[in-house]
Image: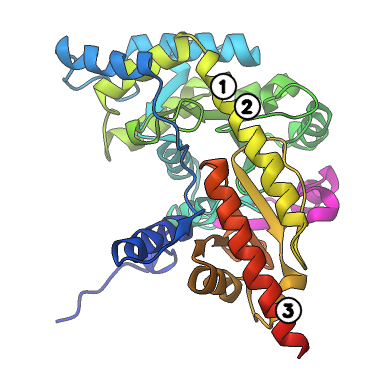
C-alpha cells in the first residue's frame, strides 16, 4: 500500500545546494575527477582553542540536557557579542540558541506565521527561505533584484509588496548567494518603510557578518534602525565565522515574547542544542578573534581571483561581493553561446564536461546565473576556472561552426 504524504511536504523540495554537494561526492566515490564548488562550508579547521573547549566540555561532564534556549554561559557570550559588534543590548530572556541558524529561522516561521500569511523575501535568496515559509503554511512573496540594482531591493519595491497579509520580512546581508551587503543608509531607508507597519516582524540573517570586506563597516538592521528593535529577530551563528559547520550552533536576539514562542517550537522538536557545542561556541565568541581575521583575508583573496576569472570567461559577468564565500555569475550570454536552455542544463554541462559542480541560480530565485563557492584553496579554484574556460571556449567554437 502506498504511503500518503502530507500536502505540506509536497509543497517543498530538498535543498538544491545539499543535492549538488551530495552528487559531487557520489561522482568522486565512483572515481570521477570532480571539483565541488557547491557547498557553503569553510575549508579551514575549527580554531584550536575552540576545539579544545569542546574537549574540555566532555572531560568536565558537560554532557547533559541544558535549558531549551541555551546555557547561561553561551547566552552571556552572545549578549556580549551583540553589544560589542552591533551596539544592540539584550538580556538572557531575549536570546535563543539552536541547532544552527537554519533552525532559528524555522522556529521563527513556525512561531509567527498562520495560514496564508505573506513573507517578503528578496531574491536572489538563500535556498531554504521559501520552503521554510511553505512548511509553516505561509506564502512567499519574492522581490527580484538583478545586477543593475546590485542584487539589493529598493525601499519602493518593499513598500509596494506590503499588503494586509504581510507578516514577516526576511533580510540577508551579506547575502548568500550574491555576496551583496546593505549599507547603513540602505538599511535605514528600508527600515523607514517598516517602522509604520507594526504587524510586520523582521528576521535579519547576519550569518556572514564576519566574512566581510565592504567599503564601510558591517551594519545590522537594528543598529541602523533602532526603532525596529521590538519587532526584529537578529540571527547569527558560529558555523561560517569560526569554521564550525558541524558543531551546529546558531543563535538570535529578539523581543522576549518572540524568544518564548520560538523556544516553545524548539522544545517540541529538538530541545536544546548540543551542550558540548554550546561550550565551544561560547569560547569562540569570547576568545581571540585573530583566526577570524586570518580566514577573512583568505576568503577576500579567493573572491578577488574568482570574480576576475569569471569576468574573463566568454559570456559570463560577475559583480564583486562585499562578503560571504560565494560568487554569483550571470551566465545568460554563455548559455546562449553554447545552446543551454536553462541554468540547470548549464550547471549540468559544467559537471559532466568540466567536472566542476556549481549550483544553478534558479535555486536562489535568479535564473540565468550560477553560484560558485570559493571556500576552498586558490589552487583548486584555479583548476576549476581553467576547466570551465576550456569547456566554454570549446562550446562557443562548436556553436559557430
In percent of width and height, residue 69 lies at: 35, 23
Q: How many marks?
A: 3
Bounds of the magenta segment: 139-165
Determine whether, in the image, residue 293 is placed left or right of residue 135: right
Q: Give the residue at mark 1.
A: 294
Q: Is residue 158 magenta?
A: yes
Relative to 58, say whether 114 is above or below: below
Q: Nearer the viewer, mark 3 or mark 2?
A: 3
Q: Give the residue at x 46% y 15%.
A: 285
- Label 3 belongs to which residue? 396
**Circle 1/circle 2 CB separation < 8 Å:** yes
Along the polypeptide, which appears first: circle 1 or circle 3? 1
Quarter of image, res 148: bottom right
Residue found 75% across the figure and 31% down from its top: 195
**Number of other residues with Cα within 10 Å of mark 3, as a class: few under 14, some 14 to 19, many 20 or more:** some
Within-10-Å neighbours for mark 2: few <14, some 14–19, many 20+: some
| Residue at (44% x, 67% y) in the render | 11
Question: Circle 3 — which element?
Answer: helix
Amino acid at each position: 500500500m502506498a504511503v500518503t504524504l502530507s500536502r505540506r511536504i509536497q509543497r517543498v523540495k530538498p535543498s538544491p545546494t545539499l543535492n549538488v554537494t551530495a552528487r559531487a561526492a557520489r561522482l568522486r566515490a565512483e572515481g570521477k575527477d570532480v571539483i565541488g564548488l557547491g557547498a557553503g562550508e569553510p575549508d579551514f579547521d575549527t580554531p584550536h582553542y575552540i576545539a579544545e573547549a569542546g574537549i574540555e566540555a566532555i572531560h568536565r561532564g558537560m554532557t547533559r540536557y541544558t535549558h531549551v534556549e541555551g546555557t547561561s554561559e553561551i547566552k552571556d557570550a552572545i549578549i556580549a557579542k551583540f553589544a560589542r559588534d552591533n551596539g544592540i543590548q539584550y538580556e538572557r530572556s531575549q536570546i535563543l540558541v539552536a541547532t544552527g541558524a537554519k533552525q532559528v529561522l524555522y522556529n521563527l516561521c513556525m512561531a509567527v506565521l498562520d495560514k496564508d500569511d505573506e513573507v517578503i523575501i528578496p531574491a536572489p535568496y538563500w535556498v531554504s527561505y521559501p520552503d521554510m515559509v511553505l512548511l509553516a503554511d505561509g506564502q512567499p512573496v519574492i522581490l527580484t533584484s538583478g545586477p543593475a540594482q546590485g542584487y539589493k531591493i529598493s525601499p519602493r519595491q518593499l513598500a509596494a509588496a506590503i499588503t494586509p497579509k504581510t507578516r514577516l520580512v526576511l533580510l540577508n546581508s551579506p547575502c548568500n548567494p550574491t555576496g551583496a551587503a546593505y549599507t547603513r543608509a540602505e538599511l535605514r531607508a528600508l527600515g523607514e518603510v517598516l517602522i509604520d507597519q507594526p504587524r510586520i516582524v523582521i528576521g535579519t540573517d547576519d550569518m556572514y557578518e564576519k566574512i566581510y570586506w565592504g567599503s564601510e563597516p558591517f551594519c545590522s538592521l537594528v543598529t541602523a534602525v533602532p526603532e525596529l528593535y521590538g519587532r526584529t529577530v537578529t540571527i547569527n551563528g558560529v558555523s561560517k565565522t569560526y569554521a564550525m559547520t558541524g558543531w551546529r550552533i546558531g543563535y538570535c536576539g529578539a523581543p522576549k515574547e518572540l524568544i518564548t514562542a520560538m523556544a516553545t517550537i524548539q522544545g517540541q522538536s529538538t530541545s536544546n542544542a548540543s551542550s558540548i557545542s554550546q561550550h565551544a561556541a561560547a569560547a569562540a565568541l569570547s576568545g581571540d578573534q585573530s583566526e577570524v581575521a586570518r580566514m577573512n583575508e583568505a576568503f577576500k583573496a579567493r573572491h578577488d581571483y574568482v570574480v576576475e576569472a569569471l569576468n574573463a570567461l566568454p559570456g559570463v559577468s560577475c559583480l564583486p561581493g562585499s562578503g560571504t564565500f560565494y560568487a554569483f555569475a550571470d551566465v545568460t550570454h554563455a548559455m546562449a553561446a553554447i545552446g543551454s536552455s536553462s541554468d540547470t542544463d548549464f550547471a549540468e554541462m559544467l559537471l559532466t564536461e568540466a567536472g566542476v559542480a556549481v549550483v544553478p541560480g534558479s535555486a536562489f530565485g535568479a535564473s540565468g546565473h550560477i553560484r560558485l563557492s570559493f571556500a576552498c584553496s586558490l589552487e583548486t579554484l584555479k583548476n576549476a576556472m581553467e576547466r570551465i574556460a576550456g569547456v566554454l571556449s570549446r562550446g562557443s567554437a562548436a556553436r559557430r561552426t
